[in-house]
Image (cartoon, rainbow, N blue to C red):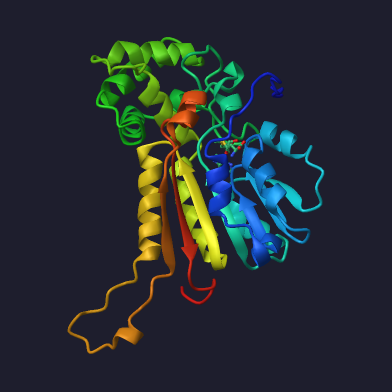
Amino acid sequence: MTLQPVPELQHRTVLLEEAVDALAIAGERADGVYLDGTFGRGGHSRAILARLGARGRLIAFDKDPLAIATAQQIADPRFEIVHDSFATLDEALAARGIAQVDGVLMDLGISSPQVDDAARGFSFRLDGPLDMRMDTTRGVSAADWLATADEQTIAKVIRDYGEERFALQIAKKIVARRAVEPISSTRQLAALVAQAVKTREKGKDPATRTFQAVRIFVNQELEELEIGLEKAFRQMAQHGRLVVISFHSLEDRIVKQFMASKAHAPQPDRRLPIRAADLPRPAARLLGRVKPGDAEVTANPRARSAVMRSIERLEAAGAQP
Ligand SMILES: C[S@@+](CC[C@H](N)C(=O)[O-])C[C@H]1O[C@@H](n2cnc3c(N)ncnc32)[C@H](O)[C@@H]1O
Protein backbone atom coordinates (compact mmCIF):
# COMPACT_ATOMS: atom_id res chain seq x y z
CA MET A 1 0.00 0.00 0.00
CA THR A 2 1.35 3.44 -0.91
CA LEU A 3 0.91 5.97 1.85
CA GLN A 4 -0.64 9.30 1.01
CA PRO A 5 -0.11 12.39 3.13
CA VAL A 6 -3.26 13.70 4.81
CA PRO A 7 -2.89 17.46 4.27
CA GLU A 8 -4.94 18.55 7.29
CA LEU A 9 -2.69 16.59 9.68
CA GLN A 10 -0.07 18.97 11.01
CA HIS A 11 2.70 18.65 13.55
CA ARG A 12 3.17 21.30 16.21
CA THR A 13 6.85 21.43 17.01
CA VAL A 14 7.63 21.03 20.70
CA LEU A 15 10.19 23.29 22.41
CA LEU A 16 10.98 24.94 19.09
CA GLU A 17 12.91 27.98 20.27
CA GLU A 18 14.42 26.23 23.27
CA ALA A 19 15.87 23.38 21.21
CA VAL A 20 17.30 25.60 18.50
CA ASP A 21 18.71 28.01 21.11
CA ALA A 22 20.40 25.05 22.80
CA LEU A 23 22.28 24.29 19.56
CA ALA A 24 23.92 27.74 19.91
CA ILE A 25 24.07 28.43 16.16
CA ALA A 26 25.82 31.80 16.25
CA GLY A 27 29.08 33.44 15.27
CA GLU A 28 31.52 31.02 13.63
CA ARG A 29 29.28 28.15 14.57
CA ALA A 30 26.60 29.44 12.16
CA ASP A 31 28.71 28.06 9.32
CA GLY A 32 28.98 24.64 10.92
CA VAL A 33 27.38 21.28 10.20
CA TYR A 34 24.17 20.41 12.04
CA LEU A 35 22.09 17.24 12.08
CA ASP A 36 18.37 17.02 12.70
CA GLY A 37 17.93 13.32 13.50
CA THR A 38 14.14 13.49 13.40
CA PHE A 39 12.88 15.76 10.61
CA GLY A 40 9.14 15.04 11.13
CA ARG A 41 7.46 17.94 9.40
CA GLY A 42 10.56 20.09 9.65
CA GLY A 43 9.63 22.58 12.37
CA HIS A 44 13.06 22.40 13.99
CA SER A 45 14.88 22.04 10.67
CA ARG A 46 13.36 25.24 9.27
CA ALA A 47 14.28 27.14 12.43
CA ILE A 48 17.84 25.81 12.22
CA LEU A 49 18.08 26.88 8.57
CA ALA A 50 16.89 30.36 9.56
CA ARG A 51 19.90 30.68 11.87
CA LEU A 52 22.53 28.98 9.69
CA GLY A 53 25.12 31.04 7.86
CA ALA A 54 25.63 30.89 4.10
CA ARG A 55 28.26 28.14 4.45
CA GLY A 56 26.37 26.17 7.11
CA ARG A 57 24.90 22.74 6.42
CA LEU A 58 21.93 20.88 7.80
CA ILE A 59 21.55 17.16 7.21
CA ALA A 60 18.23 15.79 8.40
CA PHE A 61 17.09 12.21 8.87
CA ASP A 62 13.73 10.51 9.09
CA LYS A 63 12.54 6.96 8.75
CA ASP A 64 9.09 7.98 7.54
CA PRO A 65 8.50 8.27 3.78
CA LEU A 66 5.93 11.04 4.31
CA ALA A 67 8.41 13.07 6.35
CA ILE A 68 10.89 12.61 3.50
CA ALA A 69 8.32 13.85 0.97
CA THR A 70 7.87 17.02 3.05
CA ALA A 71 11.61 17.52 3.38
CA GLN A 72 12.09 17.20 -0.35
CA GLN A 73 10.06 20.37 -0.78
CA ILE A 74 12.73 22.41 0.99
CA ALA A 75 14.77 23.99 -1.76
CA ASP A 76 17.79 25.21 0.14
CA PRO A 77 21.31 24.24 -1.00
CA ARG A 78 22.42 24.04 2.65
CA PHE A 79 19.85 21.32 3.39
CA GLU A 80 19.77 17.57 2.68
CA ILE A 81 17.41 14.84 3.79
CA VAL A 82 18.40 11.23 4.42
CA HIS A 83 15.73 8.51 4.46
CA ASP A 84 17.18 6.43 7.26
CA SER A 85 17.50 6.16 11.00
CA PHE A 86 19.72 8.61 12.85
CA ALA A 87 21.46 5.46 14.05
CA THR A 88 23.18 5.47 10.63
CA LEU A 89 24.44 9.05 10.92
CA ASP A 90 28.09 7.99 10.79
CA GLU A 91 27.53 6.42 7.35
CA ALA A 92 25.74 9.53 6.08
CA LEU A 93 28.61 11.73 7.29
CA ALA A 94 31.30 9.43 5.87
CA ALA A 95 29.52 9.39 2.51
CA ARG A 96 29.73 13.19 2.46
CA GLY A 97 33.31 13.35 3.70
CA ILE A 98 32.26 15.12 6.92
CA ALA A 99 34.37 14.28 9.98
CA GLN A 100 32.80 16.50 12.63
CA VAL A 101 29.45 18.06 13.39
CA ASP A 102 28.65 21.15 15.45
CA GLY A 103 25.23 20.18 16.69
CA VAL A 104 22.78 17.31 16.70
CA LEU A 105 19.09 17.53 17.55
CA MET A 106 16.81 14.56 18.22
CA ASP A 107 13.11 15.14 18.86
CA LEU A 108 12.16 11.57 19.59
CA GLY A 109 9.08 9.46 19.06
CA ILE A 110 6.33 9.96 16.54
CA SER A 111 4.82 13.05 14.98
CA SER A 112 1.18 14.10 15.14
CA PRO A 113 0.57 13.26 11.45
CA GLN A 114 1.75 9.72 12.22
CA VAL A 115 -0.49 9.28 15.29
CA ASP A 116 -3.50 10.98 13.75
CA ASP A 117 -3.48 9.03 10.48
CA ALA A 118 -5.53 5.85 11.02
CA ALA A 119 -3.67 4.17 8.13
CA ARG A 120 -0.44 4.13 10.17
CA GLY A 121 -1.87 2.02 12.98
CA PHE A 122 -0.24 3.96 15.83
CA SER A 123 -3.45 5.03 17.54
CA PHE A 124 -5.80 2.91 19.63
CA ARG A 125 -8.36 5.71 19.18
CA LEU A 126 -8.60 5.25 15.41
CA ASP A 127 -9.36 1.99 13.67
CA GLY A 128 -6.72 1.08 11.13
CA PRO A 129 -4.29 -1.61 10.04
CA LEU A 130 -1.99 -2.63 12.89
CA ASP A 131 1.22 -1.40 11.29
CA MET A 132 3.09 1.04 13.60
CA ARG A 133 6.23 1.17 11.48
CA MET A 134 7.75 4.62 11.09
CA ASP A 135 9.45 3.35 7.97
CA THR A 136 6.71 1.62 6.00
CA THR A 137 9.18 0.64 3.28
CA ARG A 138 10.97 -1.95 5.44
CA GLY A 139 10.77 -4.00 8.60
CA VAL A 140 8.02 -6.02 10.22
CA SER A 141 4.62 -4.52 11.05
CA ALA A 142 3.04 -4.86 14.50
CA ALA A 143 0.43 -7.24 13.06
CA ASP A 144 3.06 -9.53 11.53
CA TRP A 145 5.09 -9.55 14.70
CA LEU A 146 2.08 -10.31 16.93
CA ALA A 147 1.10 -13.12 14.54
CA THR A 148 4.31 -15.04 15.12
CA ALA A 149 6.03 -14.01 18.37
CA ASP A 150 5.74 -16.38 21.30
CA GLU A 151 3.72 -15.50 24.39
CA GLN A 152 6.76 -14.91 26.63
CA THR A 153 8.35 -12.52 24.13
CA ILE A 154 5.13 -10.55 23.70
CA ALA A 155 4.72 -10.34 27.48
CA LYS A 156 8.32 -9.20 27.94
CA VAL A 157 8.01 -6.45 25.32
CA ILE A 158 4.76 -5.17 26.84
CA ARG A 159 6.22 -5.32 30.36
CA ASP A 160 9.60 -3.77 29.55
CA TYR A 161 8.56 -1.12 27.04
CA GLY A 162 5.07 -0.39 28.35
CA GLU A 163 5.81 -0.81 32.08
CA GLU A 164 2.50 -2.70 32.05
CA ARG A 165 1.54 -4.84 35.08
CA PHE A 166 -0.88 -6.94 33.06
CA ALA A 167 1.63 -7.80 30.33
CA LEU A 168 1.32 -11.57 30.69
CA GLN A 169 -2.47 -11.47 30.71
CA ILE A 170 -2.42 -9.32 27.57
CA ALA A 171 0.02 -11.67 25.83
CA LYS A 172 -2.21 -14.65 26.69
CA LYS A 173 -5.25 -12.90 25.20
CA ILE A 174 -3.30 -12.12 22.01
CA VAL A 175 -2.06 -15.67 21.59
CA ALA A 176 -5.51 -17.15 22.27
CA ARG A 177 -7.22 -14.74 19.86
CA ARG A 178 -4.79 -15.16 17.00
CA ALA A 179 -5.58 -18.90 16.95
CA VAL A 180 -9.13 -17.89 16.01
CA GLU A 181 -8.48 -14.94 13.67
CA PRO A 182 -5.53 -12.73 12.69
CA ILE A 183 -5.11 -9.61 14.84
CA SER A 184 -4.76 -7.11 12.07
CA SER A 185 -6.43 -3.90 13.29
CA THR A 186 -5.76 -1.40 16.05
CA ARG A 187 -9.30 -1.80 17.32
CA GLN A 188 -8.86 -5.58 17.75
CA LEU A 189 -5.67 -5.10 19.76
CA ALA A 190 -7.17 -2.31 21.88
CA ALA A 191 -10.19 -4.49 22.67
CA LEU A 192 -8.02 -7.46 23.72
CA VAL A 193 -5.94 -5.24 25.98
CA ALA A 194 -9.05 -3.74 27.57
CA GLN A 195 -10.22 -7.26 28.49
CA ALA A 196 -6.90 -8.11 30.14
CA VAL A 197 -6.19 -4.88 32.04
CA LYS A 198 -8.12 -5.14 35.25
CA THR A 199 -7.47 -1.78 36.85
CA ARG A 200 -7.96 1.60 35.21
CA GLU A 201 -5.44 4.43 35.42
CA LYS A 202 -7.02 7.86 35.67
CA GLY A 203 -7.09 9.67 32.34
CA LYS A 204 -5.33 6.80 30.55
CA ASP A 205 -6.82 4.37 28.06
CA PRO A 206 -5.97 0.78 29.07
CA ALA A 207 -4.32 0.32 25.64
CA THR A 208 -1.87 3.22 26.08
CA ARG A 209 0.96 1.19 27.59
CA THR A 210 0.64 -1.75 25.20
CA PHE A 211 0.55 0.46 22.11
CA GLN A 212 3.61 2.34 23.33
CA ALA A 213 5.43 -0.94 23.96
CA VAL A 214 4.65 -2.50 20.59
CA ARG A 215 5.59 0.71 18.79
CA ILE A 216 8.92 0.93 20.61
CA PHE A 217 9.67 -2.69 19.78
CA VAL A 218 8.58 -2.57 16.12
CA ASN A 219 10.75 0.49 15.50
CA GLN A 220 13.67 -0.61 17.72
CA GLU A 221 13.43 2.84 19.23
CA LEU A 222 15.54 2.38 22.35
CA GLU A 223 18.34 0.48 20.62
CA GLU A 224 18.53 3.10 17.87
CA LEU A 225 18.53 5.88 20.45
CA GLU A 226 21.51 4.37 22.26
CA ILE A 227 23.40 3.91 18.99
CA GLY A 228 22.46 7.37 17.72
CA LEU A 229 23.57 9.13 20.90
CA GLU A 230 26.97 7.42 20.86
CA LYS A 231 27.56 8.09 17.18
CA ALA A 232 26.43 11.72 17.46
CA PHE A 233 28.75 12.38 20.35
CA ARG A 234 31.67 10.58 18.74
CA GLN A 235 31.53 12.93 15.75
CA MET A 236 30.93 16.10 17.73
CA ALA A 237 33.37 18.99 17.32
CA GLN A 238 34.66 20.87 20.35
CA HIS A 239 31.78 22.99 21.72
CA GLY A 240 29.37 20.88 19.67
CA ARG A 241 25.94 20.54 21.20
CA LEU A 242 23.76 17.46 21.53
CA VAL A 243 20.10 18.29 22.21
CA VAL A 244 17.49 15.58 22.80
CA ILE A 245 13.76 15.87 23.44
CA SER A 246 12.14 12.73 24.81
CA PHE A 247 8.53 11.91 25.56
CA HIS A 248 8.54 9.04 28.03
CA SER A 249 10.58 7.84 30.95
CA LEU A 250 12.33 4.97 29.14
CA GLU A 251 13.78 7.33 26.55
CA ASP A 252 14.57 10.02 29.06
CA ARG A 253 16.43 7.57 31.29
CA ILE A 254 18.68 6.55 28.41
CA VAL A 255 19.36 10.17 27.47
CA LYS A 256 20.00 11.21 31.07
CA GLN A 257 22.40 8.35 31.76
CA PHE A 258 24.21 8.86 28.48
CA MET A 259 24.72 12.56 29.11
CA ALA A 260 25.77 12.00 32.70
CA SER A 261 28.34 9.43 31.56
CA LYS A 262 29.92 12.02 29.26
CA ALA A 263 29.81 14.80 31.83
CA HIS A 264 31.51 12.84 34.59
CA ALA A 265 35.14 11.94 34.18
CA PRO A 266 36.12 8.43 35.28
CA GLN A 267 37.51 8.71 38.80
CA PRO A 268 40.94 7.14 39.29
CA ASP A 269 41.78 5.12 42.37
CA ARG A 270 42.11 7.68 45.19
CA ARG A 271 45.19 5.91 46.55
CA LEU A 272 47.12 6.73 43.39
CA PRO A 273 49.33 9.83 43.61
CA ILE A 274 47.77 11.82 40.76
CA ARG A 275 48.04 15.61 40.64
CA ALA A 276 44.79 17.53 40.24
CA ALA A 277 45.96 18.82 36.84
CA ASP A 278 46.42 15.26 35.61
CA LEU A 279 42.98 14.01 36.65
CA PRO A 280 40.83 12.88 33.73
CA ARG A 281 38.56 15.65 32.52
CA PRO A 282 34.91 15.11 31.57
CA ALA A 283 34.22 14.97 27.84
CA ALA A 284 31.12 17.15 28.09
CA ARG A 285 29.28 19.63 30.24
CA LEU A 286 25.58 19.30 31.06
CA LEU A 287 23.49 22.20 29.84
CA GLY A 288 20.43 21.26 31.83
CA ARG A 289 16.92 19.98 31.54
CA VAL A 290 14.04 21.99 30.11
CA LYS A 291 10.31 21.27 30.09
CA PRO A 292 7.64 23.09 28.10
CA GLY A 293 5.96 25.92 29.98
CA ASP A 294 2.26 26.07 30.83
CA ALA A 295 1.43 28.17 27.76
CA GLU A 296 2.97 25.60 25.41
CA VAL A 297 1.24 22.67 27.12
CA THR A 298 -2.10 24.48 26.96
CA ALA A 299 -1.63 25.23 23.26
CA ASN A 300 -0.28 21.75 22.50
CA PRO A 301 -1.22 19.07 25.06
CA ARG A 302 1.18 16.60 23.37
CA ALA A 303 4.04 18.71 24.70
CA ARG A 304 3.01 17.73 28.24
CA SER A 305 5.43 14.85 28.65
CA ALA A 306 8.37 16.40 26.77
CA VAL A 307 11.76 16.72 28.47
CA MET A 308 14.73 18.31 26.72
CA ARG A 309 18.30 17.59 27.80
CA SER A 310 21.46 18.91 26.23
CA ILE A 311 25.22 18.75 26.56
CA GLU A 312 28.22 20.54 25.12
CA ARG A 313 31.30 18.60 24.09
CA LEU A 314 34.40 19.99 25.79
CA GLU A 315 37.12 18.13 23.94
CA ALA A 316 37.15 17.91 20.15
CA ALA A 317 36.01 14.61 18.67
CA GLY A 318 38.92 12.23 18.60
CA ALA A 319 40.56 13.82 21.66
CA GLN A 320 39.01 11.15 23.86
CA PRO A 321 37.86 7.66 23.03
C1 LIG B 1 8.42 14.12 17.17
S1 LIG B 1 8.64 13.93 15.47
C2 LIG B 1 9.77 15.19 15.03
C3 LIG B 1 9.10 16.49 14.72
C4 LIG B 1 10.02 17.55 14.18
N1 LIG B 1 11.01 17.98 15.15
C5 LIG B 1 9.23 18.74 13.70
O1 LIG B 1 9.41 19.83 14.24
O2 LIG B 1 8.44 18.59 12.77
C6 LIG B 1 9.66 12.51 15.37
C7 LIG B 1 10.03 12.10 13.96
O3 LIG B 1 11.22 11.35 14.06
C8 LIG B 1 11.15 10.22 13.25
N2 LIG B 1 12.02 9.24 13.90
C9 LIG B 1 11.86 8.64 15.09
N3 LIG B 1 12.90 7.86 15.38
C10 LIG B 1 13.78 8.00 14.36
C11 LIG B 1 15.06 7.46 14.08
N4 LIG B 1 15.66 6.58 14.89
N5 LIG B 1 15.69 7.84 12.95
C12 LIG B 1 15.10 8.72 12.09
N6 LIG B 1 13.87 9.24 12.29
C13 LIG B 1 13.22 8.89 13.42
C14 LIG B 1 9.69 9.87 13.17
O4 LIG B 1 9.41 9.18 11.97
C15 LIG B 1 9.03 11.25 13.23
O5 LIG B 1 8.81 11.75 11.94
Residue 165 visible in the shown view: yes
Q: Give the farthest residue toward the front.
A: 295
Looking at the rendering, in which quadrant would you find the N terminus?
top right
The reply, left or right, for residue 265 in relation to residue 87 is left
The part of the image, by quadrant, that contains residue 188 is top left
Locate residue 22, reporting x and y percent: 53, 53
Locate residue 60, reporting x and y percent: 66, 48
Locate residue 208, reporting x and y percent: 39, 22
User: Residue shown at 79%/37% (left/top)?
Assistant: 73
Locate residue 136, reporting x and y percent: 63, 31
Residue 87 visible in the shown view: no
User: Residue shown at 78%/58% (left/top)?
Assistant: 54
The part of the image, by quadrant, that contains residue 260 is bottom left
User: Residue shown at 39%/36% (left/top)?
Assistant: 248
The reply, left or right, for residue 58 in relation to residue 268 is right
In front here: 289 or 135?
289
The part of the image, by quadrant, that contains residue 115 is top right
Give the answer, above or below, for where 274 lies relative to 150.
below
User: Residue shown at 61%/35% (left/top)?
Assistant: 135
Instruction: State which image quarter holds ligand 1.
Output: top right
Give the answer, above or below, for where 266 lies relative to 305.
below
Give the answer, above or below, for where 262 lies relative to 199.
below
Number of numbered discs on residues: 0
